[in-house]
């Protein structure tokens, strides 16, 4: 993982890869063009498919079980916390 300089803006883009990959990719491009470092997905190119799951080039681990665990944990959330 790269280093951060003080004041570096970062972002994460979230959404259904199946339904919104074009919009997710566009958001990553737009943020990057504004010198905002996108942490996730850093590279939204789809490189693998396992059943209903899409994995992108920047995924370090391609594990359906890991994705399912993450989704179970975030599904009940009703808010997004942003800290800068």
Image (spheres, rainbow, N blue to C red):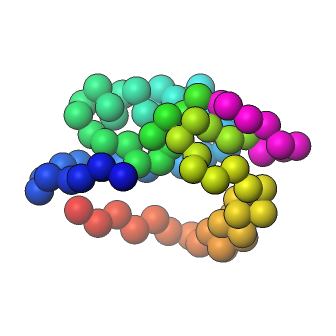
Magenta stretch encompasses residue 49: yes
Q: Is residue 57 visible?
A: yes
Please provide the residue range marked out in magenta. 46-53
Can the viewer see residue 20 in this picture? no
From what the image shows, is residue 45 above or below residue 70?
Answer: above
At 78% across and 63% down in the image, what residue appears?
65
Classify residue 17 by image quadrant. top right
- Name the residue rendered at 40%, 27% in the picture: 29
- Is 68 on the left or on the right of 40, as rendered? right
Q: Quadrant of residue 75?
A: bottom right
For image coordinates 14% across by 52% down, the residue present is 5
Front-lying residue, 81 or 33? 33
Q: Quadrant of residue 84?
A: bottom left
- Residue 82: % across, % down: 34, 63
Q: Position of residue 31 (x, y in %)?
A: 33, 34
Extreme-right residue of the structure: 51
Q: Return the residue found at the far left.
A: 6
User: Does the magenta portion include 41?
Assistant: no
Who's the residue at 58% across and 35% down the image?
Answer: 57
Residue 29's place in the image compared with 18, above or below, is above
Provide residue 15's location: percent of width, then percent of height.
60, 46
Say if 52 sits above or below 7 in the image.
Answer: above
Q: Nearer the viewer, residue 34 or 67?
A: 67
Q: Main secondary structure of the magenta part?
A: strand
Percent of width and height locating residue 20: 64, 34
- Callout count: 0
């Amino acid at each position: 993982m790269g280093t951060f300089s003080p004041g570096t803006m970062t972002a994460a883009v979230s959404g259904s890869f199946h339904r919104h990959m074009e919009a997710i990719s566009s958001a990553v491009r737009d943020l990057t063009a504004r010198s905002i470092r996108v942490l996730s997905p850093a590279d939204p190119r789809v490189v693998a498919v396992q059943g209903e799951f899409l994995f992108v080039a920047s995924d370090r681990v391609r594990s359906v079980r890991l994705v399912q665990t993450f989704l179970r944990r975030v599904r009940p959330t009703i808010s997004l916390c942003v800290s800068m």
